[in-house]
Amino acid sequence: MKSPWAEVAKRVRDTVARIPAGQVATYGQIARESGLGRRARMVGRALRSLPDGSEVPWHRVVNARGQISLPDSSEAGQEQRRRLESEGVVFRAGRIDLAEYRWRPSLDELLWGPPDS
C-alpha cells in the first residue's frame, strides 16, 4: 500500500511532467492542478525529493513572482535558469513574464484530465 506522501509526490510529478518546454508554472498553480489546493510548499517539497537524473522538468516551476526560488548563487539555481533560457524563456530583471510564459492547460485537459489518464 502506498503512503499518502507517495501519492501526493506522484500527482505533483505527473502534473509537472505536463508543462511544455518554453513554458513555466508556479508552485501554487501546480498545487491546484494536482488537487492539493493552496499547498504550494508541498509542491516544493515533492520537487526537492526528486532523485538525481529525474526526467521530470522541475526547472519549469517558479514562484508566483515569476522568479526562481533557489538562490542565484546556487548551482541548482544557475542550472534552472540555464535550462529555462535554453527553452526560450526570457528573464527580465531576474523575472519571467508570467503573462507570456505561464502554462495554460487546454480546455480538454481542464475538462477531461491530462492525456492518457
Image: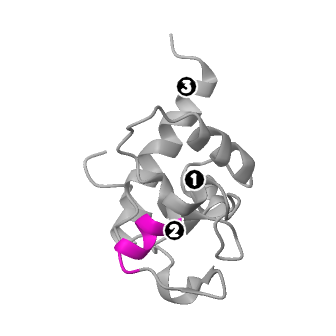
Q: Amino acid at mark 3?
A: Ala
Look at the numbered disc 2 and give the secondary structure of its residue. helix
Q: Earlier in the sequence, mark 3 or mark 1?
A: 3
Quarter holding residue 42: top right
Q: Main secondary structure of the magenta part?
A: helix
In the picture of the structure, the residue carrying the numbered disc 1 is 75
| Residue 39 appears anywhere in the view | no
Give whichever of 110, 13 is nearer the camera.
13
Counting other residues with Cα less than 10 Å from the Cα at mark 2, is it few (<14), some (14-19), or many (20 or more)? many
In the picture of the structure, the residue carrying the numbered disc 3 is 6
Residue 21, percent from left and from top: 34, 68
Q: Which residues are magenta?
A: 81-88
The reply to whether the C-beta atoms of the residues labelled 3 and 2 are less than 8 Å apart is no
Residue 43, percent from left and from top: 63, 47
In the picture of the structure, the residue carrying the numbered disc 2 is 81
Give whichever of 56, 117 is nearer the camera.
56
Counting other residues with Cα less than 10 Å from the Cα at mark 3, is it few (<14), some (14-19), or many (20 or more)? few
Q: Earlier in the sequence, mark 3 or mark 2?
A: 3
Q: Amino acid at mark 1?
A: Glu
